[in-house]
Amino acid sequence: MTDDKPTVGYVSSTERFQPRITPTPDRLKGKIALVTGSGRGIGKATALRFAQEGADIAVTDKDLEPARQVAAEVRELGPRALAFQTDVTDPQAVERTLRDAVKEFAGIDILVNNAGIVVFGSLMDCRLEDWDKMLAVDLTGAFHCTQMVGKLMIRQGRGGRMIHIGSTASLLPTAQQGAYCVAKAGLAMISKMAAMELVGYGVTSNLLCPEGAVTDINRDLLRDPAVMSKLEAMIPAGRMAHVEEIAAAAAFLASDEAAYITGAELVHDGGATISALWWR
Ligand SMILES: NC(=O)c1ccc[n+]([C@@H]2O[C@H](COP(=O)([O-])OP(=O)(O)OC[C@H]3O[C@@H](n4cnc5c(N)ncnc54)[C@H](O)[C@@H]3O)[C@@H](O)[C@H]2O)c1
């Protein structure tokens, strides 16, 4: 991706764009949300957005310190928050977190399956250990959380919301993201299965599919202006998203207003996935 570089002096249009973000006060008041991988990036932005709308937050991450910091930021906004060190690949850790969160908060109303990693590389060259690592976090980790929280929501009998952070890679093959695409496509089906199995309990389950935002998952790659400029040129909107924009979409799906939306894929990509045949 580094051929025709406009690199020197390139100013990213993503950086230049400042989204107007206006949380809806009290839209999530009285709700309790558990967000996996919320120590950083999209998960952190989602936890903070939900808190701005009044939700109490179980901030969970495999790394405790960033989770603690986010929990402190949530408390500064007003709602209650607790930090949990939870590796989603470990079902016992997920179970422990749920037990403690339920004890502390009296239930869970919203699950955001956000924790994720990316292993770059083609499917043809993917080593088994990378494949296993990739699927363990983005697919099996989400399975543990969906299953345990789903059963909890059934027992609670007060409905619920599941938002799974997929990707445009859930929908389309993406170069050099072989195992990632497979994991995210599997997550799309987890979302739809949960939608069908839980609809009778008032629980919705939807997949949110970002194309991209600059976070720790891709920061090193996107630091190269040649890569960033190429990516921005590929997206009809001409820029990547900001994490706060993705969080805003998650907040809508988490709200009462989205009660009739289930099994859906909310594509959040500046037009990227529909543009394959668009001559530009
Ligand atoms: N940033 C993007 O461009 C982009 C695009 C599409 C989809 N996504 C998806 O969004 C989600 C969040 O990614 P991000 O960009 O914020 O990345 P990030 O690296 O900033 O944040 C991911 C968080 O998940 C945590 N995590 C990783 N493995 C974990 C595990 N086993 N258990 C618990 N927590 C774990 C990390 O500690 C980190 O805090 C991922 O599922 C990712 O695939 C990101």
Image: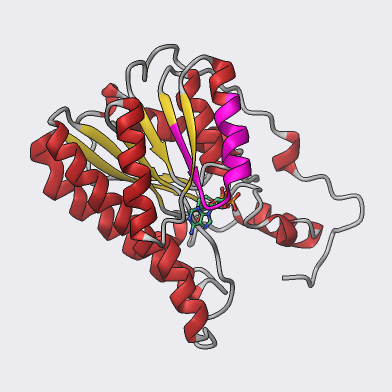
Residue furthest to the right: 8
Image quarter in which the N terminus is found: bottom right
Q: Residue 66's x, y, as percent?
A: 62, 42
- For image coordinates 74% across by 60% down, the residue present is 220
Along the viewing direction, whichever of 247 and 18 lies nearer the viewer = 247
Along the viewing direction, whichever of 259 and 232 lies nearer the viewer = 259
Number of numbered discs visible in the structure rendering: 0
Residue furthest to the top: 25
In the image, residue 70 lies in the stretch drawn in magenta: yes
Q: Is residue 270 left or right of residue 252?
A: right
- For image coordinates 38% across by 44% down, the residue present is 97
Q: Is residue 40 above or below residue 134?
A: above
In the image, residue 174 lies in the stretch drawn in magenta: no
Residues shaded magenta = 58-73
The quadrant where residue 250 appears: top left
Colour scheme in the image? secondary structure
Q: Is residue 215 above or below residue 29?
A: below
Q: Is residue 157 left or right of residue 11?
A: left
Query: Residue 40, can we see it?
Result: no
